[in-house]
Image: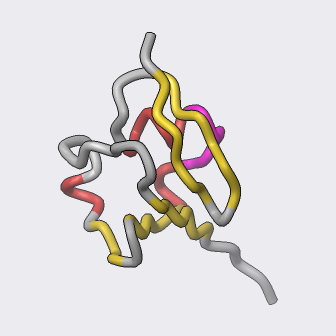
Amino acid sequence: MRSIALTVNGESFELEGSGDIPSLLAQLGANSERVAIMLNDAVLARDVWAEASLTAGDKVEVLTFAGGG
């Protein structure tokens, strides 16, 4: 299994597996319905997450939506 060195939310992260956004979210335990993704400082549309290939050195921000009151 391959590993890809990324920066996720400002910290070093080793992604195992296929190198796509759904794999990253699964490893992070993130709910894909409640996050937005920025890849290398650009917002990534949800409909391209499965096709977007992550490569070594990519910077990913996983932004979580939180309700409050």
Q: Nearer the viewer, residue 68 or 63?
A: 63
Where is residue 8 drawn, in percent x and y? 59, 56
Where is residue 7 drawn, in percent x and y? 57, 55
Indicate left or right for 8 with 22 as reference.
Answer: right
Image quadrant holding the C terminus, namely bottom right
> In the image, which residues are magenta?
27-31
* Image vertical order of residue 16 relative to residue 46, above or below: above
* The residue positioned farthest toward the top in the image shown: 1
Look at 34% across and 39% down and name the residue there: 20
Indicate left or right for 3 with 45 as reference.
Answer: right
Look at 49% across and 25% down and name the residue there: 3
Q: Nearer the viewer, residue 47 or 39?
A: 39
Q: Is residue 16 magenta?
A: no
Where is residue 23 drawn, in percent x and y? 44, 33
Place residue 28 in its image quadrant: top right
* Image vertical order of residue 66 relative to residue 37, above or below: below
Indicate left or right for 42 with 64 as reference.
Answer: left
Q: Nearer the viewer, residue 32 or 61?
A: 61
Image quadrant holding the N terminus, namely top left
Prevailing secondary structure class for the magenta stretch in the rendered image:
loop
Number of marks in picture: 0
Is the image coloured rainbow, by chain, by secondary structure, or in one colour?
secondary structure
Look at 18% across and 43% down and name the residue there: 51
Where is residue 37 drawn, in percent x and y? 43, 65
Place residue 40 in its image quadrant: bottom left
Look at 53% across and 66% down and name the residue there: 61
